[in-house]
Image (spheres, rainbow, N blue to C red):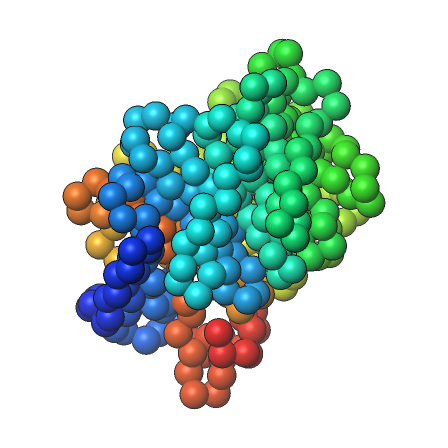
Amino acid sequence: MSIGRCLLRRACTGAATASLIILASTVDAGSYEFEIFEVPGAPITGGRGINDTGCEAGYYQTDASDFSTAHAIRRCAGTIVDIDPPTSIGDRRAFDINDAGVVVGSALRSSGQDGFELIGGLYSWVEYPGADQTVIRGVNNLGEIVGEYEGSDGIRHAFARLGGTLINVDVPGAAESRARGINDLGEIVGHYDDTTGSRHGFRRSTAGAYSTLDFPGAVSTVTGGINNTGDVVGTYFDAGGSPHGFVWTAGVFEPCDVPGAAGTLSVGINEAGRLTGEFVDAKGTRRGFVAIPILFEDGFESGNTNAWSMTVP
């Protein structure tokens, strides 16, 4: 995937948000426009999930070295709104949003770290039975969720809520597993650590079969989201430890980095092939982004007629 040279196309700022557009000037397979957003003054802003209406879920931190200063956000039409659960006390993060506007995430409260759902303005807490900590990472349009929990053994386990029931979806034989995304078909993606400590992406089919997704040549791979076409977004780490975004579509891995970034984390994907995540800029600030596929006049993303939506995003 070629990103090409980039130029500043547009910039705008507001009282609560700031954003700009970076355009990949070479239009070829896999080119994107990159819309950058941040909470003014925050050293970290990140996108985590994106729905088909163009809204994103994410977070920001007021202190880069203190996770407890994280706040959950929802961004729609360029406007960022805080959505911290009212009874939370810290480390609040939103990880995904579906087309109905349901937001899922996690936050610290007096009893520990738990998952939350925001549905129609009402918050509810989700705790995996017997777990010390629960984090919800993904939600589909049926209200099914995925995430991870940690028990008294200190090991992270993947879980899903399918048909209203919370179940374990650990990768067989893995030392630890984390589920990060689920589509409307019930396909799940995430990552796992093997017994040697190496990290791999995984995909779980609707039949419960697991397959490993490792970016070629990467030291480790983390998958973050999956859409109904089966396109998977994620992040791989090179030999120097730097993160890079990627998209896996029709069985092929393609890198996707924010131009000029010191590191890119790609986390969410919607049906139009838009991506969201965060990147490190030249000053070391972590900022959120939305990557928008560039379309040819025939309506297909960069001439790819097989794997991407024909609808102009």
Of residue 181 and residue 91, the one placed in the foreground of this image is 91
- The picture places residue 253, in percent across and down from the top left corner, at 47, 55
Vertical order, 190 against 290 (above or below)? above
| Quadrant of the rendered image containing residue 33 | bottom left
For this orientation, the residue located farthest to the left is 283
Q: Is residue 245 visible?
A: no
- The picture places residue 21, in percent across and down from the top left corner, at 29, 66
User: Which quadrant would the N terminus be assigned to in this image?
Assistant: bottom left
- Relative side of 1 to 307, left or right: left
- Relative side of 8 to 205, left or right: left
| Residue in view at x 40 percent, y 59 percent | 79
| Residue in view at x 29 percent, y 56 percent | 15
Q: Is residue 115 visible?
A: yes
For this orientation, the residue located farthest to the bottom is 297
- The picture places residue 278, in percent across and down from the top left corner, at 36, 48
| Residue in view at x 60 percent, y 22 percent | 133
- The picture places residue 287, in percent across and down from the top left corner, at 31, 48
- Relative side of 132 to 72, left or right: right
Vertical order, 196 against 302 (above or below)? above
| Quadrant of the rendered image containing residue 152 | top right
| Residue in view at x 69 percent, y 57 percent | 141
For this orientation, the residue located farthest to the top is 153
Of residue 133 and residue 69, the one placed in the foreground of this image is 69
Vertical order, 187 against 161 (above or below)? below
